[in-house]
Image (tube, rainbow, N blue to C red):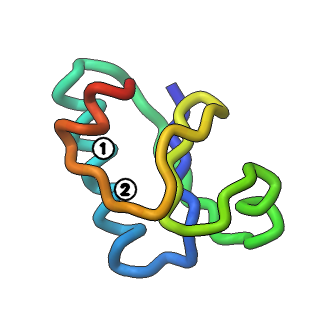
Amino acid sequence: MIIKILGSGCKKCVTLGENAKAAAAAAGKEAEIIKVTDFAEIAAYGVMSTPGLVVDEKVVSTGKVLTAEEIGKLI
């Protein structure tokens, strides 16, 4: 599973990345966490408000920091 965190690298983006890692671990799934900071690439996903969360190339959240529990339900 590939999880991408879309954003500038701000505190919200870092927190979302940590929560995604925790959610994958709790679900017993191996996940590669990739941080995407290039705004052209972020825009290519159709994300206009960050942070964005992409799971296996599907945008599942934009503009908010999900908890590990919320992310667990999406993966």
Mark 1 secondary-structure assignment: helix
Marks counted in the figure total 2
Residue drawn at (28%, 26%) of the image: 73
Above-or-below relation of 3 to 28 = below
Quarter of the picture containing the C terminus is top left
The amino acid on which the numbered mark 1 sits, given as a three-letter code, is Lys
Query: Could you tell me which residue is drawn at 74 percent across and 50 percent down?
Result: 45
- Residue at the spot x=53%, y=68% of the render? 50
Give the amino acid at mark 2: Gly
Q: Is 43 left or right of 70, judged from the image as shown?
A: right
Please, is residue 71 above or below residue 34 in the view? above
The crowd level at tag 2 (other Cα within 10 Å; few <14, some 14-19, many 20+) is: many
To which residue does mark 2 refer?
Answer: 17
Q: Give residue 34's position: percent from left, percent from top.
A: 55, 51
Residue 65: name its quadrant: bottom left
Residue furthest top in the image: 28
Q: Position of residue 55 (x, y in %)?
A: 53, 33
- The 10 Å Cα crowd at callout 1, few under 14, some 14 to 19, many 20 or more, is many
Residue designated by label 1: 21
Q: Position of residue 8 (x, y in %)?
A: 56, 77
Query: Residue at coordinates 33% horizontally, 20% vertically from top-left?
Result: 29
Q: Relative to 20, is 38 above or below?
A: below
Q: Are marks 1 and 2 in contact (CB under 8 Å)?
A: yes
Q: Is residue 73 above or below residue 11?
A: above
Q: Position of residue 2 (x, y in %)?
A: 54, 33
User: Image quarter for residue 15?
Assistant: bottom left
Is residue 3 shown left or right of residue 39?
Answer: left
